[in-house]
Image (cartoon, rainbow, N blue to C red):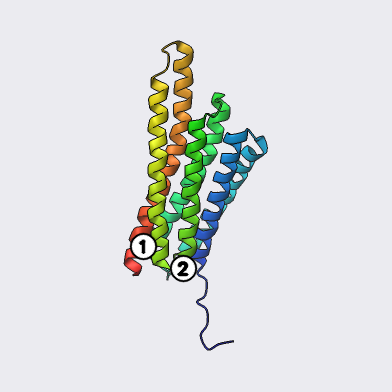
Amino acid sequence: MGIFKRKADNVFIRLLVQQAQATKAGIMALLDFVSTGNEVAAEQVGEIEKQGDELRRILIDELHKTFVTPFDREDIYDLSLYLDDVLDYAHTTVLELRMLGVKPDEHLVEMVARLLEAADELLLAMERLDRNPLVALDHSRRIKHRENQVERVYREAIAELFSGPEDVHHVMEMLRLREVYRHVSNAADRADEAANTLGSVIMKMT
């Protein structure tokens, strides 16, 4: 073994990475569900969301027990919160689709696909935050770009909904779809908030 030892893993970085892994896995399952109607994938979203909640509970417990943290406690808390929110919105998307009897359309599939790309960038950013903060910063910028793409598709989808016929059936379908779209849009917003927090953290670190 060389005289230089590898920097020890920090419990908070590890837990944030695990939360980001769960978030990506949840969005992957959501994409499978909205693309194919796979009910097993829908159930997986709920199971992964529970795993994400448990990881967040562990992280908060560690915050209570630990005096020294790798960066500001508030930033650790916020990053964990935003990751948890993304996964929560993935789960509520499944719940709303089922409760409202909505059939996913191409707009929803595209929004979730872009959200998955944002989740992938979130994971890469968390994995590189400790040892390669400037690389993590680049990934945080890509997260913001993916959020913009989700919002673009969201606006196009809403415009298309409102351009349809004005009969009662269409209006009801429009309202149901808009509710589901908003969950995915909100998930992308939380990913964007995580990117903003990452930028602040990295500015303090470098």
Q: Earlier in the sequence, mark 1 or mark 2?
A: 2
Asked if residue 153 is positioned above or below residue 17 in the image, the reply reads above
As measured in the structure, the alpha-carbon distance from the residue carrying label 1 to the one carrying label 2 is 19 Å
Q: Is residue 112 among what the camera can see? A: yes
Q: Is residue 169 above or below residue 189?
A: above
- Please provide percent x and percent y for residue 152: 38, 37
Q: Nearer the viewer, residue 187 or 85?
A: 187
Residue at horizontal 48%, vertical 24%?
176
Question: With 157 as the anchor, is 1 left or right in this view?
Answer: right
Label count reads: 2
Q: Which mark is residue 30?
A: none
Say which residue label 2 marks: 66
Residue 110 lies, in percent from the top left, at: 49, 37
For this orientation, the residue located farthest to the right is: 40
Residue at disc 2, secondary structure: loop
Q: Residue lying furthest bottom in this view?
A: 3
Query: Residue drawn at (54%, 50%), measured in percent from left and top?
Result: 24
* Label annotation for residue 201: 1
Q: Is residue 42 left or right of residue 78?
A: right
Q: Looking at the image, can residue 49 be seen?
A: no
Return the residue nearer the eye: 175 or 124. 124
> Looking at the image, which residue is at 57% across and 45% down?
28
Question: Whole-percent x and y of residue 104?
Answer: 54, 29
Tell me the quarter of the picture where residue 98 sits.
Answer: top right
Q: Is residue 204 placed above or below 195 in the rendered structure? A: below
Assess disc 2: are there few (<14), some (14-19) or many (≥20) residues with their C-alpha within 10 Å of its C-alpha. Answer: few
Query: What type is the residue that disc 2 sits on?
Result: Thr
